[in-house]
Amino acid sequence: MRHYGKVTGDDAARAKAWPERPATTAREAVLPAQSPPKAEIIAETARLLDYEGAEHLADDPQQIAPRTQSLAWGKAIRRQIAAIVMLACFAWILRDRVTGLDYAAILASLGQVSAWQWLGAALATLASFAALANYDALIHKIMDTGQNEGQSKRAGWVSIAISQTVGFGLISGALVRWRMLPGFSMIEASKLTAMVAATFLAGWAVVTAMVVIVTPVQLPGLPIFALQGFALLGLLLGGAVAALALWNPVVKIGKWQPRLPSLPVMGRILWLTIADTAFAALALWVLMPPDTVHPLIALYPAFLLALGAGFISGTPGGVGPFEVTLLMLLPGAEQAPLLAAIVAWRAVYYGAPAALALAVLALGAPVRHIPPRGRLVPAAPEYTPRIAELARLSPHAEFGILRQGEHFVLLGENMRSGWMVGQTQQALVGMRDPVGETDLREMLRALRIEARAQGRLACLYKVHARTALEARRLGWSVVPVAQECWLRPDRFTLDAPAMSGLRRKLRKAAKAGLTCEHCMTQMPMAQMSEVAAEWTTARGGERGFSMGRFTPDYVSEHEVVLAWFDGRLVGFASFHANDHEWALDLMRTSDDAPDGTMHQLIVTAIAAAREMGCPRLSLAALPPRPDQIEGPAAMIWRRAERGHGAAGLRQFKMGFAPHLTTLYVSAPSASALALACADIARIIRKPPALRPARDPDGSGVWTHEITDRGGEH
């Protein structure tokens, strides 16, 4: 995660002197490619380690190296002392068992391990480390480090093989990753190592709880039902975290505001944890003598608890806590054969991978791989020439919501087509239909690949029947989600019988003295801001995601109709516009606007669009009737429109006698569709705050905080 905060003039001048490096991701291509001076890196490292004098380090370069080195050695020594004390405690606990061990029997049992057992354990170890390598690859994607997946996996298994053997995993793992990942700073390596450790620990806790409930083990002095109760409590806690990730993914803990992983990422972490630990247990089980072996299903829960004890202790390889816990949980096992199997397992699972990892580490860091240019164009409030051309060609003027700075464009394989996509916590959403010379099937596959790379679900939202049909052919779940209301300005008339209610509203507005105009000169932005603020306060906030939010820069690119009453602005409506369509985006009115203001704004806009030769005007999507929709799609409207008069909105739009076109929502499976719909409903109702999209002080440094793959929130 990289943060680009507001900087002072001095900071900006110093930033311009920083050495540049090539951009490696789409995100970095639009931000200053700069790195902080060495002194600043060391000072930041000291700050992260809670060194009380960190704020003075950058001011006195002569003190940086010795102070930081002393700080690092001090922390390492304290951790080593703690580990030694813990080892001594476990040695004291084991004193009776150790003095009574038959070492000759242990050696004899070790000598009875066959070549087939060694081979089976080696294959199980290989499978376990394959899962371990994917931990790192997954976390790299979450943190958007820009590292090549192959390099991420290689650095992952090498660092884990070494750190689990030598101990002090957060320190040793960070050092190895720093060495193995070209262009990676020590701070980034430390954050990555901590993230990998945290995700494994969380996955281990959930998997252990599930296994203990299904196949309980007997803890001395603790009834089985009590252990299962604790396990059930752990699962409930895990379920609460999963629910929190869906409904409120940003958790506030004091000044710390971590973003929880998406549910697809959580699911992948659980599968990797199961694969990792199951194959590790299988490696131990294979090495146990056939005549004394426990069934694998009985060994697995004991192994998980022993593994957790070793992991939490921080001792090298979990030596001590692992053996104590396993001997305690397998009381019927003969000690000599069990300890011989553990010794053999440590040689296969710890010794051999560590030796191989040291050999790989000795070869040095690989050449940095520059990933190919991605097809996902980052969010930005200004169009590039390519995006401007797509916006011009799009039959949907709603493509203009890109100027809000929240959404992306997934370019087609031919680079002459594109798809507006939005991000939610759980999904990467293709919004409306692809634009340009597009191959729908290829674009759907590209969307799914990009979503998986981000740890999200692929989803389509408010697409037309042609796109929905192609998705269904690929096996996706498809359901109706909305109806678009649209008019032909050149054929619109107020004389039709269906317009009687609209005519009545327009008469009320005219009688009150309301006048509306298409704004062809400079917009009264100050008054528009006041109206928008009053409207937002009265309704508890604006909707987002597929609905625009008022900012002066955003609205200045729209076609705008203004409503005046007693010489002051009481309302306005803004429209996305291109050669093919005007599309209603914002409609804001003050509390004292005369009755009929919104109706007059739309009628004035229809007349302006007709005068400008626009063939189509969209009143945007209309929620379906409650009795006409069910399943996942219903979540979006029932939650997004709760308490905000969906019935009144329907009555307002239908008063213009519009044409209706059904729009669809789609995802690769029914469960993915339900999850994506729930998340779209959440982000529409509670969108993240908009960040400044332009440099506010002229320093040339952006003020975005980059938190997701190539995106900004």
Image: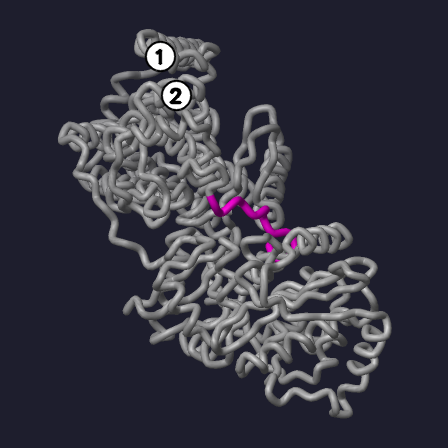
Quadrant housing the N terminus: top left
Please give the name of the residue rendered at 37% of the width and 43% of the height, measured from the top-left corner. Answer: 31
State the residue in front, 103 or 303.
Answer: 303
In the picture shown, does residue 486 fall above or below 333?
below
Query: Residue 369's quadrant in the figure?
Result: top left
Q: Nearer the viewer, residue 107 or 526?
A: 526
The residue under the point 56% across, 25% down is 220
Look at the image and tell me whether residue 155 can be seen.
yes
Predominant secondary structure, magenta span: loop
Name the residue tied to disc 2.
45
- Against 516, residue 639 (above or below) is above
Q: In this orientation, which residue lies closer to the viewer: 349 or 61?
A: 61
Question: On the image, numbered disc 1 is attached to which residue?
Answer: 68
Left of 246 or right of it: where is 368? left
The boundaries of the magenta stretch are: 683-694
Q: Residue 152 in the image: x percent, y percent?
A: 28, 41
Reading the chain from its start, which is encountered first: label 2 or label 1? 2
Q: Residue at 56% x, 31% y: name it.
A: 256
Looking at the image, do the residues carrying marks 2 and 1 touch, with CB atoms under 8 Å apart? yes
Amino acid tagged 2: Thr
Q: Is residue 477 visible?
A: no
Q: Is residue 686 magenta?
A: yes
Q: Could you say where residue 71 lies in the image, as x and y percent from the top left?
A: 38, 10
Q: Amino acid at mark 1?
A: Thr
Image coordinates for residue 84, horizontal then vertical, percent: 39, 10
Quadrant hosting residue 362: top left
**Secondary structure category for the residue under label 2:** helix
Please name the residue shown 34% across and 7% down the image.
Answer: 63
What is the number of callouts on the image? Answer: 2
- Label 1 secondary element: helix
Residue lying at the far left in this picture: please name it.
363
Q: Is residue 74 in the magenta section?
A: no
